Image (cartoon, helix red, strand yellow):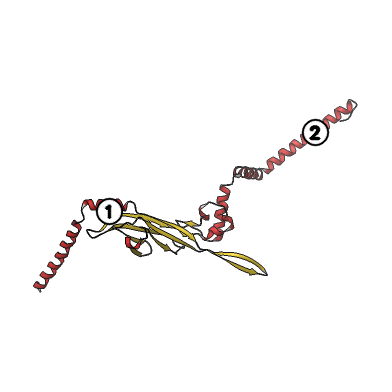
Amino acid sequence: MKKYMRYIILFVAFFLVFDSVKAARCETKVKNELAALANYVKASYEIKEESEERELTIDGQTTTYKIPKYVFEITIYNLKEGLKAEVNVQNQGRSFKVTNSDTTDNNYTFYDYDIGTIYNYEISIMSDREDCPSTDLRTIKFTKPRYNAYSEFTYCKNSSIYYCQRFIGSEINLKGTDDFLNKIKVNNDKNNPDRDKIEEKEEIKKLVGKNWKTYLILFLVIAILIVGIIFYIKRRNKKKGWEL
């Protein structure tokens, strides 16, 4: 048994030494060259629309409606020879590797059809050279947004508020359509250019409603005074021989 254990230990030690020798082969100059190449690697996405329009006939009248369909076209740029990328889709448990041989003119494009979920991409750029194996060079991160169905509401036409954006990068706390419409109304009221005038009118209404008795008494007093003044002027003018 001891004899076998000795062989196992020697076998493990051999691989450890072999790996350390391989790592040692990655010279500083090579690392710097690869790091310089990695700095030019970029990643971005473009949202392509493939929505379909269909017709619906009700009581002899035909209308059209849209079935929203979008795709995220994601591209890794400048993945040159000697580099590889490991793409990890966080929160999804998916990952895959891309080498220069998979690219077209050093660019690699893939597609994401999940428009209903927000999740993060993490792309690790590593060495693909035998003399510098799997050395991490840099990491690129970005968030893939999700489609916001509320953006199709008529209330959102030409609106730039967050609830109306077609794609959002963070979840919105909405309990339903009524909650959405209420938030739209609140937002529109806040951004109304006549907001100050509306608020002044509301304040006046509140003030009158709260003190209506005082205003009524004041109105009656003023009315009595005016009637009294008119009556007095008429009497004085009659005495002078002419009427008002």
The kind of residue on which mark 2 rests is Gly
| Number of marks | 2
Q: Position of residue 175 (x, y in %)?
A: 51, 60
Which quadrant of the figure contains the C terminus?
top right
Quadrant assignment, res 15: bottom left
Q: Residue at x 25, y 50 (%)?
A: 32
Q: Residue at x 53, y 55 (%)?
A: 164
User: Where residue 228 is drawn, which disc sits there?
Assistant: 2
Which quadrant of the figure contains the N terminus?
bottom left
Q: Residue at x 47, y 58 (%)?
A: 47
Is mark 1 in CB contact (under 8 Å) with mark 2?
no
Of circles 1 and 2, the one toward us is: 1
Q: Considering only vertical position in the picture, is 204 above or below 24? A: above
Q: Residue at x 71, y 40 (%)?
A: 217
The residue that mark 1 highlights is: 34
Q: Position of residue 137 (x, y in %)?
A: 29, 54
Asked which secondary structure carries label 1, the reply is helix
Quadrant assignment, res 207: top right
User: Where residue 241 is drawn, which disc sits there?
Assistant: none
In depth, the one of 135 and 117 nearer the eye is: 135
